[in-house]
Image: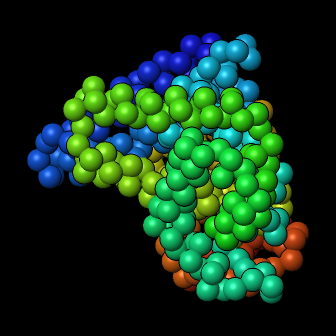
């Protein structure tokens, strides 16, 4: 059942993304902007399906699950094998000193951390840096796996632990998946007669959406690997399009629960800030990091009316 549902959603989301790319390339400015905005949403559906496959929830059989993940990765574009290792690393490092973008440690530069936050999460460069890294791997895998890239370049962008894990993957599998992803992008560019401006508009909109969502569902939450996330409040249609990705605390607490069952695991008594509340709070910049195990920073997130702390926020 899950495999058929997710496959149908993958086909629909890919078709919708093609329509948006075509509209952004061929229609007037107003329609093109609407198409880019819609693309930012439906391409995130495809990413959410890859996320399901990362956790082995995309289909019942391992082979079909991996196929779903690989095809979903074409639209990002990325390697499914890389995404699986990176995302599982996220579950291991969540809210630790190795993955903390809303705070800065005493040994870190506040300016550099703000650059990571503003440029990376809020202005969309997080997505662009991932795609750039994939392009480097495609054209020069040796450079991606070099000591300079792993020990100096990646840490300077905040991806040190992730790249250190990614270079351990089999070269040919990763290279082949990245080649397929960029080949897919080139194919639809030619097939749909797209324009560079239209494609850039769509992917920049997606980059803005995806990059901020990756951290809005964690910012100011408890410094706890399992509970350090939020079940964000958004309008139901947007949550459905994202396959309940906004129910991120429930996902971290129950990573083997499929997307369509996550609403049953959301505790109504837990704090649920809105996506926009967290988003605008991030523009205030990074703050000094509390120690590991600290409760959620509710006073900062709700400055006008500090709420009572619930056990889930600890």
Image quadrant containing the C terminus? bottom right
Placement of 158 over or under 227, stated as above or below: below
Which residue of the protein is positioned furthest toward the left in this rendering?
28
Q: Which residue is depicted at the point 54% across and 65% down?
A: 121
The residue lying at 75 percent from left, 41 percent from top is 85
Question: Of 30 and 80, which appears nearest the observer?
Answer: 80
The quarter of the picture where residue 13 lies is top left
Task: Say above or below: 160 vs 301.
Answer: above
Give the left or right position of residue 186, taking residue 25 as reference: right
Residue 123 position in % (x across, y down): 45, 67
The number of numbered discs placed on residues in the rendered structure image is 0
Residue at x 28% of width, y 30% of height: 190
Q: Position of residue 291 (x, y in %)?
A: 86, 77
Does residue 20 sit above or below 122 in this rendering?
above
Nearer to us in this view, 64 or 157: 157
Q: Is residue 153 above or below residue 201?
A: below
- Relative placement, left or right, of 29 versus 38 is left
Q: Is residue 152 visible?
A: yes
Residue 142 picture location, percent across and down: 68, 47
Q: Nearer the viewer, residue 210 or 144?
A: 144
Which residue lies at the image location 68% right of the left edge and 29% below the top edge?
Answer: 173
Question: Is residue 243 in sight in this rendering?
Answer: no
Q: Is residue 72 left or right of residue 36?
A: right
Picture quarter containing residue 216? Answer: bottom right
**Quadrant containing the N terminus in the rendered view:** top right
């Amino acid at each position: 059942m899950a495999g058929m549902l997710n496959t149908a959603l993958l086909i629909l989301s890919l078709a919708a993304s093609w329509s948006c790319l075509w509209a952004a390339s061929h229609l007037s400015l107003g329609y093109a902007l609407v198409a880019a905005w819609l693309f930012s949403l439906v391409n995130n559906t495809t990413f959410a399906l890859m996320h399901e496959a990362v956790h082995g929830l995309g289909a019942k059989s391992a082979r079909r699950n991996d196929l779903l993940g690989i095809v979903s990765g074409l639209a990002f574009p990325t390697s499914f094998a890389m995404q699986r290792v990176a995302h599982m690393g996220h579950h291991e490092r969540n809210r630790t000193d190795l993955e903390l973008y809303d705070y800065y440690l005493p040994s870190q530069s506040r300016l550099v951390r703000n650059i990571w936050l503003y440029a990376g999460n809020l202005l969309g460069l997080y997505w662009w840096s991932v795609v750039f890294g994939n392009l480097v791997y495609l054209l020069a895998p040796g450079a991606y796996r070099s000591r300079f890239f792993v020990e100096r370049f990646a840490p300077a962008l905040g991806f040190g632990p992730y790249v250190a894990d990614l270079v351990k993957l089999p070269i040919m599998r990763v290279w082949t998946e990245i080649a397929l992803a960029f080949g897919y992008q080139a194919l639809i560019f030619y097939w749909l007669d797209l324009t560079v401006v239209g494609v850039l508009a769509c992917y920049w909109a997606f980059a803005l959406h995806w990059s901020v969502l990756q951290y809005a569902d964690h910012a100011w939450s408890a410094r706890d690997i399992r509970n350090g996330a939020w079940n964000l409040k958004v309008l139901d249609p947007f949550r459905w399009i994202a396959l309940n990705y906004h129910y991120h605390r429930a996902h971290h607490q129950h990573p083997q629960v499929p997307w369509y069952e996550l609403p049953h695991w959301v505790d109504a008594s837990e704090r649920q800030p809105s996506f926009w509340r967290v988003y605008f709070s991030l523009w205030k910049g990074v703050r000094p990091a509390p120690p590991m195990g600290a409760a959620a920073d509710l006073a900062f997130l709700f400055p006008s009316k500090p709420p009572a702390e619930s056990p889930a926020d600890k």
